[in-house]
Image (cartoon, rainbow, N blue to C red):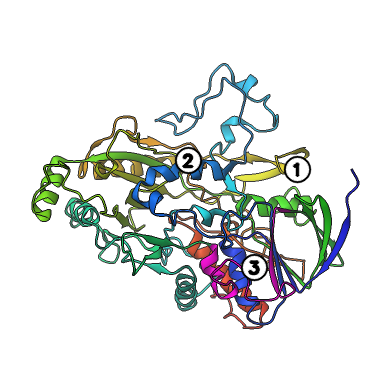
Amino acid sequence: MARTVERIDTEVFIAGTGPAGCTFARFLVPAGKRVIMADAGAQLSARPGAHLKNAFGYQRDIDKFTPIVQGLLHQISVPPQPGYTTTLDPISFQPPRHKHHAAARSGRNPRQDPYQNLPAAAVSYAVGGMLTHWTNNTPRHHPTMERIPFISAAEWDGLYAQAESLLNTRTDVFAKSIRHRIVQEALQTHYAGRLHPNHLVQALPVAGQRLQDNDELVHYTGSDTILAPLLDENGGYRYRPEQFRILPEHRVKKLVTANGRVTYALVEDLIGWKEIHVYADIFVVAGGAVLTPQLLWNSAISHESEGPLGRYLTEHPMTFTQIVLSQKLMDTIQSLMGGSSDDDPIPIPMNDPPPMVWIPVQEGRPWHCQIHRDSFQYGLVPPDIDNRLIVDLRWFGMVGTNRENRVSFETDLKDKFGMPQPTFEYTLSEDDRRRAHDMMQDMVEAAHALGGFFPGSEPRFMPPGTSLHLQGTTRIGPQNDGTCVTDLDSKVWGIDNLYLGGNGLIPTTNASNPPLTSVALATRAAQHILGKKAPPPQPGA
């Protein structure tokens, strides 16, 4: 069926409506730039990009939100054929090899080696991206162990402050929780004398705030929070359509280049089934650590076989367990609450918020620790279990940067959205595995300080990619030396009007959640577009 071809002219075109893309729009539209954003996913809420957990029912029973997260995530690696398992060997921290290895390689992507795969890696196709269902954890990266060294400490402080403002980051969202207090105190006792004074057990920064009219409800930050000055309260736009608009269910297929510039973006209207050519002065691609290089690859931009696009892929090895709070801690809670009700033998109020506790990355402990209760694509507590008694422990580890860890794309094999199929080549070094086992031991010891393991959720290494924190595939750098895709202003080397955003730009080894850093980098890039000169790179970084 022949499709209609239309032309749209604007000043800035942004592919992707997650936090990084929305940060660009947040700065550029009020400055007078005409901006169009596009996303292959649908708009799932009246207000574009709102967090779907901003509903009383989901917050009162957090496990009801888990199927929502599962439904919104799209696995991006084609699973191997039956006979291959993603269960990790506890010694090698790798999938076990077995006699079905050859058969496993003959799946729908025959070029995907299952032993170099990230089987749990996933993306979200929706206006708002991952921020429609994320856990809203926004810690700053450690100043020496995690942060990008090419940007000065003083500039990082300013960028992080701006990013925290855009995301409405706070540390008091769970301060009134009795479980938060008890868990934090128990872990403070457990780690007494073993943590750096600046990185003790503390409240995990959260993007959101409790409502003043009903403090049992949290308004979690979504992409609509970043876009707030551009939106009205009813989900419309404060600007005329020619000044700012979002195109949901519009797939960006290709960027067409000429003479070192992007001329137009080839966009497909997936509902109206027509082709749109979007001409702009500036193009921004902010689709995450896989979808961004996928679009560049399909556009023949920076995808030479030995080039940096898709390389230096990192993710966070992850350990997970759930515990049942110990009787000792329950007795402490009962004492603090003045006894339990005859109608409810559990001394935790039904409206008590869950804990949100954090142990930051620090010297000698290269892992990031979250002790809380939240909705992921795993860890669902059965309905016959009172989840007031359950606490989740999630430890995220560091891996070294490795040029050979990469995602490439099969131009003759298509994914569900008609784009080149990703193929992963990812392995852990011996140092990576050693750190992962040290991290597991630390998590198990912390769990014992809180209670016993919940049956079925005993400590385990999660399948690679589970953290959803993929990074490094479009990394930034101070020189066009073949190790980075963009300069420090997030502009693609060799393309005068193409900027990137998202976790793929982060070039460092780290363990903490990356969204705050990605928003900070997008802030820096948007300011550069507007002519606000950033400080030069630090000497010797």
Q: Quadrant of residue 415?
A: top right
Q: Determine whether label 1 and label 3 are within 8 Å by CB.
A: no
- Kindly identify which residue carries mark 1: 418
Q: Residue at x 37, y 35 (%)?
A: 460
Furthest residue in direction right, as rendered: 2
Q: Residue 99: x, y in percent? A: 57, 16
- Front position in the image: 156 or 364: 156
Q: Which mark is residue 490?
A: 3
Magenta span has 242? yes
Q: Secondary structure at mark 3?
A: loop
Q: Secondary structure at mark 1?
A: loop
Q: Residue 84: x, y in percent? A: 56, 23
Query: What whole-number distance in Å separates the C-alpha atoms at marks 2 and 3?
Result: 35 Å
Q: Residue at x 70, y 50 (%)?
A: 294
Tell me, yes or no, if residue 308 can be seen here: no
On screen, residue 268 above or below 14:
above
Q: Residue at x 58, y 53 (%)?
A: 44
What's the residue type where badge 2 is placed? Pro
Q: Secondary structure at mark 2?
A: helix
Q: Quadrant of residue 447?
A: top left
What's the residue type where badge 3 is placed? Ser
Q: Residue at x 46, y 72 (%)?
A: 160
- Kindly identify which residue carries mark 2: 67
Query: What whole-number distance in Å separates the C-alpha atoms at marks 1 and 3?
Result: 27 Å
